Every structure is written in C-alpha cells, then in structure tokens.
Image (spheres, helix red, strand yellow):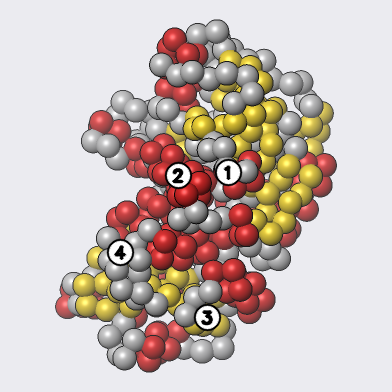
Amino acid sequence: MKALRFYAPEDVRLEDVPEPDCGPDEVKLHVRNCSTCGTDVKIFHNGHQNLTPPRTIGHEIAGEVVEVGAEVNATYGSDWRVGDRAQVIAAVPCGECYECRKGWMAVCANQTSVGYQYDGGFAEYMTVPRQVLKVDGLNRIPDNVGYDEASAAEPFACAINAQELLGIEPGDTVVVFGAGPIGCMHIRIARGVHECGPVYLVDVNAERLKMSAEAVQPEETIDASEVDVVERVMELTGGRGADVVITATAANVTQEQAISMAARNGRISFFGGLPKTNPTITCDSNLVHYRQLHIHGANGSAPEHNKRALEYISTGQVPVKDLITRHIPLDDVLSAFDIVKNGEAIKVTVEP
C-alpha cells in the first residue's frame, strides 16, 4: 500500500510499504480521510521529539473498519464490525496516571499519539492500536456525517477542550487570533455552543482573513499588519476590552496583545504553542493582577471531547463541511503541506 513515511526533517517520502497486519487486540481501518494541520507542517520541517522514524504520519483520521481483532470486542466491551465507520483520537491517554484518574485525560502524564509513537493516517490502511481502544478512543461516525467531516473532529475536540476551560457566557465579546481552520472552529463553537456575543477575527494574512471571514462571518476582521489590534479592540468594545481572547496561532506577540486587550475578569486561552526556540513573552503582571485576568493553557483533547465534536457536527450545532476547502488524493499528499503552510485553504483533507 501507499503511505507517507517520515525519516527525518524534510525527508518525508510517499512510498510502497506492506499493508499492516491486524493483531488480536487491534482494529484495522481503510483510511478514507486524513486531514492536515499546522502541526503536520512543523513535523515535516522540524520533526518531533516523540516521533520515532521511520513513521507513517497523519493524526486527523476517519475510515472504514476492514478487520476486527479476535479479542477486541470481548476485551473492550465494544461491538465493532467490518463495514463500521470510525474516527480515531490523536492524543492517547494512558488511563491510569494521577491526571487520568482525576479525569484530566487531556494532560495525561504518559500521553502517546497516533502518527508519533503509532503509525498514522496518511496511508491506505492503518491499525488502531490497543492503547486507543483501551481508552474508548475509536468513535462511531454518525450516519449523517461524512468521512471528511469526521476527520476534522480531532482538531475540533482540541478547541472544545480549550473553550471548556474558558467559561464563555452568552453575550461575551470574543477575539480570536488566527484565521486558520482552528480559529474558524473556535468561532463556531463559541457561537453555536456557548452563544457568545460579537466575535472579532485577527490575522496578518489578508487573503486568509478574507477567505475565513466569508465562511464564519465574524462581526469584524482585523488585519494586524495594518492596524494596532489592541487599540481597535478597545474601540470596538467602548474601551472595556474583550471578555474572551483565544490565540490560535504560534506568535508570541498575540499572547502579549491578548493580555493587553482583555477586559476585567477576562479569560485568555494560549491555544497555539510557541516555537521552542522562542517560547517566552513579556507579561504585564499588573494587568493580570488588577484586571483579575484568567490565563489558560490548552493542549490537545480527551477522548470524550472527540465524541462531543462528532455529536456537534451531526446535529448541525457546529458545522465543519464548508471549512474543508481542499480535497487532495494520497498520491499528491506532499502538496497538502505547502497549501497549509501558505494558508491557501481553510482546511485540507487527504483522501487515500
């Protein structure tokens, strides 16, 4: 079968490899969609400390069950059958550490990941490892949800996790930095689930800002390359600032701006991680102190967030179909990385 294999930074090859065997405690999928994100681009260029090459990458996965290991259903209390449609979690908690026992599976101390420690979804077939099945991380796709939409449930789950921490209330003013797919999902969740008030979308790429704004219709877009973002948000809010600020981009300055523009009792999500070579920001601690600001990290998701994402997509509460603007065949998978890097699409999905 064809699979995209990572050997070293910028040495990523689409090649023929043996089709994987399905172990007694595994499920084998015919991958139908594996979507891409900024993390894939970072892996392509820089690798990752948890990724052991050679490795099939890709972690936003939906596919059709083609084989169920003999011990799977009895061991995990499941009822998987050939022909079932399934979505796979990416971040795999151990289920046993202190954090997992507390219910904090998104920050499992022993977390592993599909596409890092286990072969991922940029391939025609893959096996879902027992570690995923053990934590109920293989999810049935609702009948009215396409494989492409289901593959977007993984990043969607990460956004759900972040917003769960923020406590967004009806009517809250929300600022989202980053007009990529995750920024668009954040806007749709804040509106569709939490019934927030006005939303302002910020980016430095005018074309991407325009493309995303057409899809998610923020009350206003702010081109940070043209205007002072903090000043503009203060104008838009009558000097009060934003109740909620989400930095869905890997830029240090956006985190600093988020603190400056947050209203009293404002909640801030540092959703996008910063480069390891430049991970620090300047924080005006007095703003945090006197405005009583709440700054949250947000990293990945728990299996339960993935289930909720599929439910929101199925009910139409948070649509994602129109955010998937490019479908790429597996034979042309390497082009997907350039499309994502250049911001030429909202969401790109690969179809083996």
- On residue 311, the disc is 2
- At a point 27% along the width and 60% down the height, the residue shown is 167
SS at circle 1 = loop
Toward the viewer: 284 or 301? 301
SS at circle 2 = helix
- At a point 50% along the width and 8% down the height, the residue shown is 71
Distance CA(mark 4)–CA(mark 2)? 20 Å
Nearer the camera: disc 3 or disc 1? 1
Q: Residues within 10 Å of mark 4 (few under 14, many from 20)?
A: many
Toward the viewer: 50 or 230? 230
The residue identified by callout 4 is: 168
Dot 3 amino acid type: Thr
- At a point 43% along the width and 12% down the height, the residue shown is 75
SS at circle 4 = loop
The residue identified by callout 1 is: 145
- Where is 135 relative to 306, above or below? above
Distance CA(mark 2)–CA(mark 1)? 9 Å
Residue 123 quadrant? top right
